[in-house]
Image: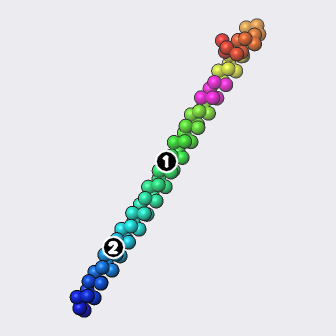
Amino acid sequence: MNLQQSNRYALNNQQGAILLMVLITVALMGLMAGIAGSSWQTIVQRAKEADLLWKGNQIRQAIGSYYEASQVGGAAPKTWILDQ
């Protein structure tokens, strides 16, 4: 093997190593993006659940207020709106 062939072989080895590093980097970035996406989905789902629980609690309180007012002698429409 002469010097020119030796240099060509070394250059091909370097290009192969760089290609391998790029492929590994892309694979790791894809994996990290997948993990981040699933984490983001969980965060959004929990926020929606918290909002739904809050709204349900507000409805429960409104129904309770209406029931208590109706037991006392009937609730006037003004107290329905003000939730007193």
Q: Callout 2: few (<14), some (14-19), or many (20+) C-alpha neighbours within 10 Å?
A: few
Q: Given this view, does label 1 or label 2 mark the residue nearer the observer?
A: 2
Residue underneath mark 1: 39
3D distance between C-alphas at marks 1 and 2: 33 Å
Residue depicted at 51% across the width and 50% down the height? 38
Q: Is residue 51 above or below residue 44?
A: above
- Residue 40 percent across, percent down from the top left: 51, 46
- Residue 22 left/right relative to 53: left
Q: Nearer the viewer, residue 79 or 1?
A: 1
- Magenta-span inclusion, residue 56: yes
Residue depicted at 28% across the width and 81% down the height? 10
Local secondary structure at mark 2: helix
> By what rule are the colours in the image chosen?
rainbow
Local secondary structure at mark 1: helix
Residue depicted at 75% across the width and 13% down the height? 77
Is residue 52 visible in the rendered image? The answer is yes
Q: Which image quadrant: the C terminus?
A: top right
- What's the amino acid at mark 2? Ala
- Residue 3 percent across, percent down from the top left: 22, 88
Is residue 75 visible in the rendered image? The answer is no
The prevailing secondary structure element of the residues shown in magenta is helix
- Residue 81 left/right relative to 38: right
Residue underneath mark 2: 17
Q: Which image quadrant: the N terminus?
A: bottom left
Please report the bounds of the magenta region as a residue range. 54-59
